[in-house]
Amino acid sequence: MMAPCPRFPSTFGLQSGYGSNIMELPRLAIPFLLRCFFMKEDNNGNNKSDVNIGDVAARVVRLDDQDSLAEEMREIGVSPEGVNIMAPKGVHRVVRLTGVPLKAAILLKQEMLAKGGEAAVPWDVACLNADRTDMLLMGTLRQYRRVLDSLRSQPFGLPAIAGVIEDALEAWDCRLRHEPVKLRSGGHTLRFGSKTYIMGILNVTPDSFSDGGKYLDPDRAVARARELVEYGADIIDVGGESTRPGSDPVPEEEEIARVIPVVERLVREVPVPISVDTCKSGVARRALEAGAHIINDISALRFDPGLGSLVAQYDVPVILMHMQGMPKDMQVNPHYDDVIREIYDFLRESIKRALDLGVKRENIIIDPGIGFGKTTEHNLEILRRLDEFRSLGRPILVGTSRKSFIGNVLGLPVDQRVEGTAATVALAIARGVDIVRVHDVREMVRVARMADAILREEVLERDER
Ligand code: HH2
């Protein structure tokens, strides 16, 4: 005889307030009825199953994107239709929105709740005491899809806000699918997502913090570049101006005299793309005329108004880096209210500025600027949360190599930071970085290849074919 039904379990209960929906009743009732059917109670009223469960085991699986989840579903035999329906329900995302107008925030919260998600807002919003607010949206991809569909027919700017949310979600998930970037000469193409690119540092300066004075002579510089390529560098980054903390700018003619003879030779003599680390359009123009492939601008097109249009004219990739202050004073009490948010906003605006100047979106690479106006704690937080920059939808570069935050953590001088650098490179790759700018190319190529083999299955599959 069937035992009396257990009490309606609280976890099945209808939520009060937002989200209550009579249409949900059949969905809630089915598991409840199944439970009534299969469960018995012992004399004390505790539930006891009459089925021998044998060897059932549970394991939390780490599937943080739809593709991996779909793969796992196929593995256990879920039908293709089932995979399509269920995969978006199994991937949860938290999205931080900033600067949302009050009325839009209230409707957006209601929409998230109505579709089974959540939206955290400050108390001021509940009291209608704010003009604009930040929000944390929480939901599965399916819930977002349903919310976004319904926002598109709502007032208060919600259709545009839906677009912002959708772009961030798509960019975060599509990092492995950036379009290939064909470089202007040498038949080079950058295929971001397929591997981690190693940018080897070649400073032709007398005073760089780590390799200053070693490669001022062009013959030595070229020999070093050849060595870096032999070790596995994918790109050589030539710099003629140190930007270490406390450094002064170098006059343009001086920078040209250091950089251009080396670039002219490298373009002919080494088989990888050449990037030039400069903020000056005069230096960049000469380098591009000499055949350089990429411009690396630590000022993100802010210091020289001519640099953006030059990059656009030559149709080359440009690295836009975040920096607070100027190299001379950037390490004097760097301060942020919210370091990730401020760098994110800076890079978002930098991308917009570059686009306005005519730079193609596919030519933009972003860089949070490790060590440029940041304390050790700021640098560590940036690395910990590097993946948040993926929502900007552009490939990410980081330059941690031998920098002082590694020295501060390990208590080691600049010539003993290779293992510390290796840790940052491996973890940055795990967070989705596309290019690492390093001095110790031989070692970091090994770190990156190993990390790629773990994280980018397609790399291994490709190599094994
Ligand atoms: N760091 C340095 C120089 N250029 N460019 C990008 N995009 N990102 C970086 O992190 C970055 C950079 C500083 O390192 P280094 O070139 O070794 O030292 P110096 O400025 O003293 O020449």
Image (cartoon, rainbow, N blue to C red):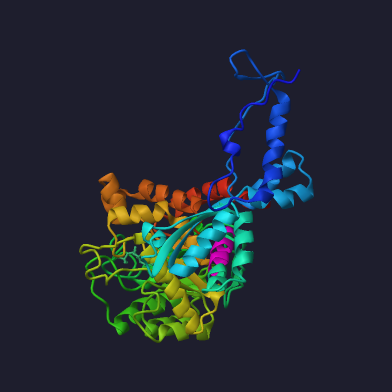
Which quadrant of the picture is home to ligand 1?
bottom left
Q: Is residue 172 magenta?
A: yes
Residue 192 position in % (x across, y down): 57, 63
Determine the residue located farthest toward the top in the rendered image: 43
Q: Residue at x 54, y 79 (%)?
A: 360
Residue 453 visible within the image: yes
Magenta region, main secondary structure: helix
Instruction: Please determine whether, in this image, residue 331 is positioned above or below residue 357.
Output: above
Residue 134 position in % (x across, y down): 41, 63
Instruction: Please determine whether, in this image, residue 138 is positioned above or below residue 38.
Output: below
Q: Is residue 119 magenta?
A: no
Q: Give residue 11's quadrant in the image.
A: top right
Residue 245 position in % (x across, y down): 25, 65
| Most foreground residue, 7 or 179 | 7
Residue 67 visible within the image: no
Q: Is residue 328 left or right of residue 22?
A: left
| Most foreground residue, 175 or 454 | 175
Q: Give residue 336's quadrant in the image.
A: bottom left
| Most foreground residue, 92 or 293 | 92
Instruction: Please determine whether, in this image, residue 296 is positioned above or below residue 111.
Output: below
Residue 339 position in % (x across, y down): 34, 60
| Most foreground residue, 44 or 464 | 44
Q: Residue at x 31, y 51 (%)?
A: 406
Magenta extent? 164-173
Check the picture and name the quadrant holding the N terminus.
top right
Q: Is residue 96 left or right of residue 86?
A: left
